[in-house]
Image: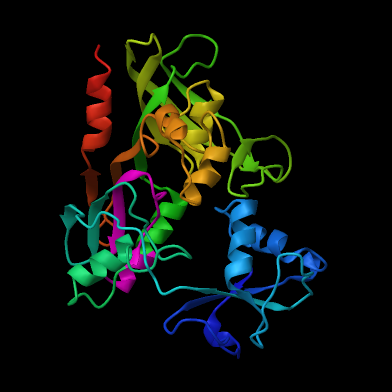
């Protein structure tokens, strides 16, 4: 993404733009020269459909001099595209964040589903880091050690000192003594072809350049791909009254690639329940991002979010080196869905 901080450029607020509006600034890279403006904006707002990108351009696109821009305008290299949005009116998010462990250096919490971990184009105030900073005004430093997708629930670590921040990120990057375990509910039972219930899935992946969504990964081999390894453990299988099989799957994350667990499980014939990107129809993801999910979409998804939960994280304490295990129980939405299937 070629976003530029608004403090780095001079620009004119257009007449008619409401006071307090939020501006996002995008620099056009040379390789995008000649693109339609709506196409360029679509490439920058990764979670937005092409139709929605056109609507955003019509409603909010200006150049740095305050001139209104149209969807079919052609962008030029180094041009600054400004999107003026109405003052933040964010979707409500969960703000109850249980603390799992805390000391003078380290904080571990159970992130609820639908709470983004950090500010983005869509969320600013309603994020994990902002909620925790507001709850700890005496804490001079608070930094995320790693991330979880907005819909994924579970264990996440934060540092309360700069020394811990450096040590924790180095520890997680090297993965020395670090074990991350997730629970997922899947449509179908993961199968590598031999009926095994416990196995390692080692399948490389990369960003799917053929997908319009620009955040989707796919399996791939060869130069430039990312190695990915997930330990799959099918804990239990249940059948709904419809006859459809569901599985409770424990996944050990041996590498930390984007969407790794969801992609690996889908490739094994068992996508995660509620997954809008790797489930029945990837276009559901764009409709969800635009707030346009249909009743049919919701019925097909079965859960409003993908059923993936970071349940356990084991690692040496970044400062003391002592072994530390942090666990978050299965959240109510996943537990209720699973119990509702029967045995």
Residue at position x 33%, y 62% in the image: 127
Instruction: Give the quadrant of the C terminus.
Output: top left
Image-based side of 14 in relation to 326, left or right = right
The image quarter in which residue 252 lies: top left
User: Which residue, as the protein is rendered here, is positioned at the far front?
Assistant: 16
Q: Nearer the viewer, residue 203 or 249?
A: 249
Q: Percent from the top left, x then y, of residue 137?
A: 19, 76
Q: Percent from the top left, x then y, of residue 145?
A: 36, 59
- Evaluate whether residue 164 shows in this view: no
**Relative height, residue 59 to residue 175 (above, below):** below
Residue at position x 56%, y 87% in the image: 15
Q: Nearer the viewer, residue 68 or 248?
A: 68
Image-based side of 214 in relation to 76, left or right = left
Residue at position x 53%, y 84% in the image: 16
Q: Percent from the top left, x then y, of residue 206?
A: 64, 43
Q: Which residues are magenta?
A: 143-166
């Amino acid at each position: 993404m070629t976003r530029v901080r608004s403090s780095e450029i001079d620009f004119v607020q257009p007449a008619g733009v409401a006071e307090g509006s939020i501006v996002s600034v995008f620099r056009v890279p040379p390789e995008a020269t000649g693109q339609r403006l709506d196409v360029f904006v679509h490439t920058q707002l990764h979670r937005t459909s092409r139709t929605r990108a056109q609507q955003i351009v019509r409603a909010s696109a200006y150049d740095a001099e305050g001139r209104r821009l149209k969807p079919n305008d052609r962008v030029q290299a180094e041009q600054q595209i400004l999107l003026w949005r109405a003052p933040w009116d964010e979707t409500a998010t969960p703000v109850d964040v249980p603390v799992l462990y805390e000391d003078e250096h380290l904080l571990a919490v159970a992130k609820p589903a639908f709470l983004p971990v950090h500010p983005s184009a869509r969320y600013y105030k309603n994020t994990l880091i902002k909620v925790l900073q507001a709850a700890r005004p005496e804490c001079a430093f608070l930094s995320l050690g790693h991330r979880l997708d907005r819909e994924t629930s579970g264990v996440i670590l934060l540092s309360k000192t700069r020394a811990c921040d450096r040590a924790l990120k180095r520890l997680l990057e090297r993965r020395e003594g670090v074990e991350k375990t997730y629970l997922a509910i899947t449509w179908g039972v993961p199968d590598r072809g031999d009926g095994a219930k416990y196995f390692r899935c080692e399948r490389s992946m990369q960003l799917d350049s053929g997908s319009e969504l620009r955040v989707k990964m796919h399996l791939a081999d060869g130069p430039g791909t990312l190695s990915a390894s997930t330990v799959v453990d099918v804990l239990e299988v249940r059948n709904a009254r419809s006859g459809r099989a569901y599985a409770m799957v424990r996944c050990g994350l041996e590498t930390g690639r984007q969407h790794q667990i969801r992609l690996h499980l889908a490739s094994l014939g068992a996508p995660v329940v509620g997954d809008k990107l790797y489930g029945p129809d990837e276009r559901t993801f764009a409709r969800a991002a635009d707030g346009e999910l249909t009743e049919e979409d919701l019925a097909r998804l079965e859960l409003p979010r993908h059923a993936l939960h970071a349940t356990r994280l084991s690692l040496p304490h970044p400062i003391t080196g002592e072994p530390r295990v942090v666990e978050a129980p299965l959240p109510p939405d996943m537990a209720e869905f699973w119990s509702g299937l029967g045995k």
